[in-house]
Image (cartoon, rainbow, N blue to C red):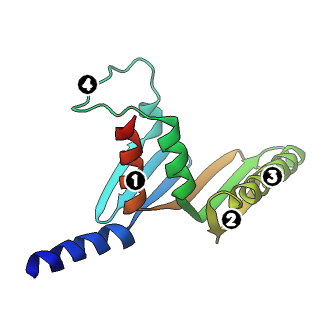
């Protein structure tokens, strides 16, 4: 009886548990782009410039992950994104150039969000593009939450093993 209850609890955990990862991309003036990853109580910060360097030596991983397009398409179709914050502060010395830039970014951003809502973005709560006049300035803060159910990860793994 206890084994049945434990198996039922594990089954319910797998079926209903959602994995949520919070990603934040931050660019402050006079600093590099930083990627902050939060998963439960784990926090990890990555400097994107160091990550993209071409001359760094690649370390050998303890295991290697090979991606299959069918599995990736399945997992992306089951994944939900929520943009919790997107703040962009941009400034140029020339006001006309700043107006063109802010209009272009606004049009591009809201068009991309409208297209992505059909696929997997839930809702966008805070999107702001703020012009900063009479100085060269760039600051970006982007936060999103990525959610996927544990059962979908297991099903994707089974797809991979079948091939």
- Mark 2 / mark 3, whichever is N-terminal: 3
* CB atoms of marks 3 and 4 within 8 Å: no
> Is disc 2 placed on a helix, strand or loop?
strand
Q: Residue at x 9, y 80 (%)?
A: 2
Front disc: 3 or 4? 4
* CB atoms of marks 2 and 3 within 8 Å: no
Distance of label 2 from label 1 (alpha carbons) = 34 Å
Q: Position of residue 55 (x, y in %)?
A: 41, 17
- Mark 4 / mark 2, whichever is N-terminal: 4
Report the disc number at residue 155. 1
> Is disc 4 placed on a helix, strand or loop?
loop
> Is disc 1 placed on a helix, strand or loop?
helix
Distance of label 4 from label 1 (alpha carbons) = 28 Å
* CB atoms of marks 4 and 1 within 8 Å: no
Closest to the observer, 123 or 25: 123
Residue at the right extreme of this rendering: 96
All told, the count of numbered labels is: 4
Label 4 Cα crowd, 10 Å radius (few <14 / some 14-19 / many 20+):
few
Q: With respect to residue 147, does 6 lie above or below? A: below
Which residue lies under the disc numbered 3? Answer: 102
Q: With respect to residue 129, does 162 lie above or below? A: above
Closest to the observer, 99 or 153: 153
Which residue lies under the disc numbered 4? Answer: 60
Q: Is residue 113 visible?
A: yes
Front disc: 3 or 1? 1
Report the disc number at residue 127. 2
Front disc: 2 or 1? 1
């Amino acid at each position: 009886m206890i084994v049945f209850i434990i198996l039922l609890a594990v089954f319910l955990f797998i079926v209903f548990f959602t994995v949520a990862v919070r990603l934040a991309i931050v660019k402050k003036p006079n600093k590099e782009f930083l990627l902050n990853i939060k998963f439960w109580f784990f926090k990890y910060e990555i400097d994107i410039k160091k990550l993209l360097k071409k001359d760094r030596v690649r370390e050998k991983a303890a295991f290697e992950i090979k991606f299959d397009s069918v599995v990736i398409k399945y997992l992306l179709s089951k994944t939900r994104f929520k943009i919790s914050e997107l703040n962009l502060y941009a400034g140029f010395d020339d006001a006309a150039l700043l107006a063109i830039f802010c209009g272009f970014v606004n049009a591009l951003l809201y068009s991309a969000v409208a297209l992505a809502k059909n696929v997997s973005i839930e809702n966008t709560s805070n999107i702001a593009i703020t012009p900063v006049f009479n100085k060269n300035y760039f600051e970006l803060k982007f936060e999103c939450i990525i959610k996927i159910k544990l059962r979908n990860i297991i099903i994707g793994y089974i797809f991979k093993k079948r091939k």
